[in-house]
Amino acid sequence: GTHHWIPRSQRLFGGQIIGQALVAAAKSVSDNLYAHSLHCYFVRAGDPKVPVLYQVDRIRDGRSFTVRSVRAIQHGQPILICQASFQMLQPSPLQHQFTMPVVPPPEDLLTVEELIRLYLSKPDLAEKYKLGLNKLLANEVPIEIKPVNPPVFYKLTASEPKNLFWVRARGYIGEGNMKLHCCVAAYVSDFAFLGTALLPYPGYRAQFAASLDHAMWFHSTFRSDEWMLYECESPWAGGSRGLVQGRLWRRDGVLAASCSQEGVLRVKPVTRPSKL
Ligand SMILES: CCCC(=O)SCCNC(=O)CCNC(=O)[C@H](O)C(C)(C)COP(=O)(O)OP(=O)(O)OC[C@H]1O[C@@H](n2cnc3c(N)ncnc32)[C@H](O)[C@@H]1OP(=O)(O)O
């Protein structure tokens, strides 16, 4: 696996490693099987200077379900261990899902880049914020994001640990390759996910934040290059860790996937300039 967007932390982006691990697992199963879940642990930081080797173990090929175990390896050591399970399409009379939250459509909202440009155009914006916003703008991520409740970047306001944004992969993937859409959704699902646990604590900034594990369940067909609503919430934080849970909704209200992640969050108080 080669690298796309590299975060400022200079560790490999977790979503990229999960997405590529799922690509590797998916290549080892037959075409009539579809990913329905994955469970991963990030055991070492990924090094952006070298590629990642994905080693797949064929754990079991069952009649309906097939399980693969993938190790992502760099410098001879695992950086991620991932179990992925695939199933052949099977109908069922049992069918239910939660209801998608009612939010404005993506066409009525601004992308993160448009929001940043809007803030940068404000004549009264302090210099110290301009630098941070320009750094964010230079961050070329292969995902488009439209926050439903855009954050006010320079205001320290605590909010509930809940977040909603429209997301889609940049570029065209097209219909047909459901395995690829799941891999791209795995990439997308790790982006801006753990930050949900920090929303109630504007007085602290993350000194060290990294995902420890990530799990996903795929429920229906979807296209990751079309807008999906990502509903994120953090039911708990403590012990220098935060738990986040997410639901990816197709815009027609069908629940496409569910995600869970725990991350290490080491924070320090934001220092405000003295008024003297
Ligand atoms: C949030 C974006 C989502 C992402 O994509 S994150 C990328 C995917 N996830 C990862 O890369 C995580 C990979 N896993 C790992 O790196 C390791 O397993 C992991 C989680 C660091 C745990 O390894 P350990 O050896 O147990 O590391 P550690 O927790 O002792 O140290 C990690 C860093 O924290 C620091 N630390 C330790 N105790 C601390 C304390 N009490 N207060 C403040 N900082 C502390 C420690 O120095 C270390 O920092 P650094 O890595 O040296 O810069």
Image (cartoon, helix red, strand yellow):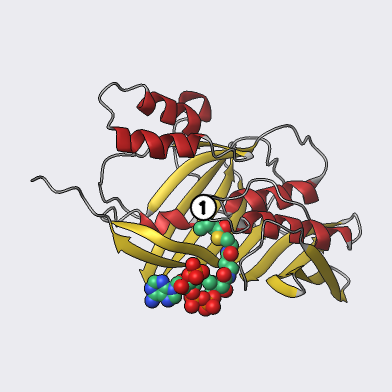
Which residue in the structure is indicated by mark 1?
Answer: 98
Q: Nearer the viewer, residue 273 or 234?
A: 273
Quadrant in which residue 78 is drawn: bottom right
Residue 149: horizontal and vertical position, in percent? 38, 38
Query: In the displayed structure, would residue 227 be above or below residue 87?
Result: above
Q: Position of residue 41 (x, y in %)?
A: 62, 71
Residue 263 visible in the displayed image: no
Position of 136 compared to 213: left or right?
A: left
Q: Is residue 5 above or below residue 109?
A: below
User: Residue 196: x and y, percent?
Assistant: 42, 54
Looking at this view, is 230 or 274 the one in front?
274
User: In terms of secondary structure, where does tag 1 sit?
Assistant: loop
Can you tell which quarter of the image residue 224 is in? top right
Which residue in the rendered view is the most extreme toward the right? Answer: 30
At 45% across and 31% down in the image, what residue appears?
Answer: 104
Picture coordinates of residue 201 (x, y %)?
A: 29, 57
Total tally of numbered discs in the picture = 1
**Does any atom of ligand 1 lie closer than 8 Å to the CB of label 1?**
no
Image point (69%, 43%), residue name: 222
Write the residue at 80% across / 71% down.
67
Along the line of sight, the residue nearer the viewer: 126 or 143: 126
Q: Is residue 81 above or below residue 135?
A: below
Seen as rendered, the residue at the extreme front is 276
